[in-house]
Amino acid sequence: MFELSLLCPHDRVEPVSDALEALDALSVSVEDADAQTDAEQALFGEPGMPAPQNGWQNSRVSALYSSDSLAREALAVLQVQDFFADCDVLALQELPEQDWVRLTQSQFSPVEITPEFWIVPTWHVPPTQARIVIRLDPGLAFGTGTHPTTRMCLRWIAQQALLGQVLDYGCGSGILAIAAAKHGAMEVDAVDLDDAAVQSTLLNAQANQVRLHAGLPPIASGLYQTVLANILATPLKVLAPLLWSHVVPGGSLVLAGILERQADELKDAYAPFCKLEVSDAEDSWILMTARR
């Protein structure tokens, strides 16, 4: 495998990337060339806020080719194009053979929720102190236990003596629904607008040997002792009357995907129904709960 690496200013990244793909690159990736330097600038804004800028000032564009000759031919074609102006060649080098599956797996380690409750990828052995384990590998749907919003929801679940009937609204990978089932929930319904998420939840539930119902939102009916929703602030505000309508008297509403600065917005949105309180916080994210 051979890698051709180029340094491109912001306005050249798209045409160069498109050209590399047209020139039979096996893959094309773009990285911030100024990362980890004093020139590094933020590209993505916080949820609900506009991006500071549309692209990095300087980008490293890398293309993989199966042979040195193909990479050199692609470079020769690129260098005579007008859009290649102001771009520089950083390197054309052979990459060592690697076990890419093992390399990818090495990036995901077991996640501790509590000393006795862990999220463990299938290629790892669970820690000896783990009493409750969810086996979960990274997939197409959100929720592997690594994001603060997911960890806070999982911690909340682990601390409850009684979950009763549970609704996981916006289930993603199904991690919260599975956690509820493993912590003694009587019945669990998991819903999502994305068919891929529903299928992911069903497969993960089967792999973890728990029983739950998963489907599109119409399967959520009646009242639940616990209603969980780990989404984002804007849809949570829109869903306020729906989510609250599913909470049984004496039951709990648990909301995540909320930044600390959005707490008052959520309190105002839910004020006609309940009094939301901040129950947990981690890395600028918060968990908000209410009891009916």
Image: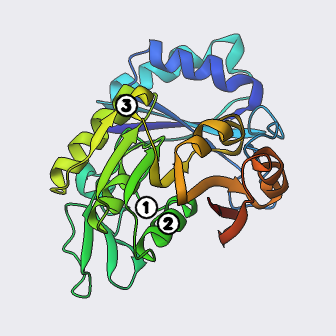
Residue 154 seen in the current view? yes
Who is closer to the viewer here, 277 or 97? 277
Residue 97 seen in the current view? no
Q: Quadrant of residue 160?
A: bottom left
Q: Residue at x 71, y 11 (%)?
A: 82
Mark 1 burial class by Cα count in 10 Å: few <14, some 14-19, many 20+: many
Nearer the viewer's eye, disc 3 or disc 2? 3
Q: Is residue 199 left or right of residue 167?
A: left
Contact (Cβ within 8 Å) of mark 3 with mark 1:
no
User: Any mark on residue 151, and which?
Assistant: 2
Q: Earlier in the sequence, mark 3 or mark 1?
A: 1
Quick one: quadrant of the N terminus? Answer: top left
Q: Residue at x 24, y 57 (%)?
A: 102
Q: Residue at x 43, y 47 (%)?
A: 167
Q: Residue at x 75, y 30 (%)?
A: 10
> Which residue position is annotated with label 1?
145
Residue 75 location in percent, x, y?
51, 23
Location of residue 171 with respect to 132 vertically, above or below:
above
Q: Is residue 188 left or right of residue 257?
A: left
Q: Quadrant of residue 142?
A: top left
